[in-house]
Image: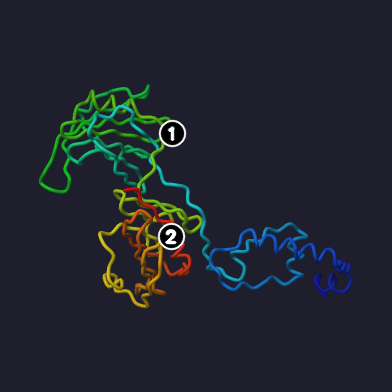
Amino acid sequence: MNDLDLVDRLGPKPTDLSAPAMGAARARLDAAMAQAAPVERRPRRRLPLLAAAAAAAVGLAITPVLVGSHESVALAAVDPLTFPLTPTALPGGLGDPVFERDSNFMAARYGAALDGVSIVTEVEDDGLWSIPDNAQPAEIDGHPATVITRTVFNGTPSSAPAVTVIWHSDNSDWTAVTGSGSYADAARVEAIAESLRDRAQPVDLALSVAPRGWSVVAYKEDRILTLAASGEADRNDLTVALVKRLSVNLSEYGAHDVETLTINGEPAQIGRQAAEAGEPTWVLEARTSSGQPFSLQAPASLTRDQVIQIAQGVTYRP
């Protein structure tokens, strides 16, 4: 006879739960499930009453969205994506900024790529820039800085002179301001850098809801927004992209099982796309409340209703 046999035969017997205790346990479980019900309306298995009572007795947290499924994905409100800095001394005529985010930086560009001003921040390593031997020292807001004079290109044979000032900001990240073309003047660029304030600017393309815990892994020129659970783009990411016009029957995506619905009071379409592996992914085209056409491509782990709910929360500030 081993120790477990001894405990089973000779150990103290558990006390039966009273009717009030059973009722309280059921009430606690139902209340928790009502407060955190998942957006995805899948049938859920209710925990056996004795298991629920035991969990309540020892204070275990129950996450209803995971009950009955290890693959459930819940939606949650999204903190708005913003650019953290605002220049207060920009030259006139540059217009509104265009924003961009990648895994190791966030940028705001004012004016043209070869004749304008750009601000890059949230850079953890100054190795993002190549610092030549002729770089000059400077000071920005009390911080040692480096001024670089160089030539910039925009993917074509065209080029322009540029001046960049780089410094280590108070939040322990590197920040840089570049003036190119007619703005490639060291004194002007340093003045713009000095004028930066910790005042967030909202981006133009945004979501109001997204899969809980997913983060932005790319934001391209106010036209493409990508989120992923892994922290980097992969085949299971979710991407919203502005399009010039809506396609017919989602033919440009090779979609099947296409159906028509209404989003923001306008016709929209949703269908499935063949995936390299696993279930077909989702594709949807619709218009924002401001009338901007967009596409939404999402992984198969989301339900149809969740994809539609995300699409209803896409906003664009023209």
Query: Quick one: which residue is furthest to the left in this view?
Result: 157
Q: Residue 124: in sight, yes or no?
A: no
Q: Position of residue 214 (x, y in %)?
A: 46, 55
Q: Position of residue 30 (x, y in %)?
A: 70, 64
Q: Secondary structure at mark 2?
A: helix
| Residue topped by disc 2 | 312
Figure check: 119 above or below 266: above
Q: Amino acid at mark 1?
A: Asn
Left/right placement of residue 287 relative to residue 64 reads left
Q: Nearer the viewer, mark 1 or mark 2?
A: 2
Q: Secondary structure at mark 1?
A: loop
Q: Position of residue 309 (x, y in %)?
A: 46, 62
Q: CA distance from mark 1 to mark 2?
A: 35 Å
Q: Classify mark 1: residues with Cα within 10 Å, few (<14), some (14-19) or many (20+).
A: few
Left/right placement of residue 59 relative to residue 162 reads right
Work out whether residue 292 or residue 100 is closer to the camera in this orientation and state it: 292
Q: Quadrant of the N terminus?
A: bottom right
Work out whether residue 128 or residue 223 is closer to the camera in this orientation and state it: 223
Q: Position of residue 193 (x, y in %)?
A: 31, 28
Q: Amino acid at mark 2?
A: Gln
Left/right placement of residue 252 relative to residue 152 reads right
| Residue topped by disc 1 | 171
Q: Classify mark 2: residues with Cα within 10 Å, few (<14), some (14-19) or many (20+).
A: some
Please name the residue shown 32% across and 46% down the image. Answer: 100
Image quadrant where residue 239 sits? bottom left
Figure check: 298 above or below 280: above
Query: Quick one: which residue is furthest to the front in this view?
Result: 265
> Which comes sooner in the sequence, label 1 or label 2?
1
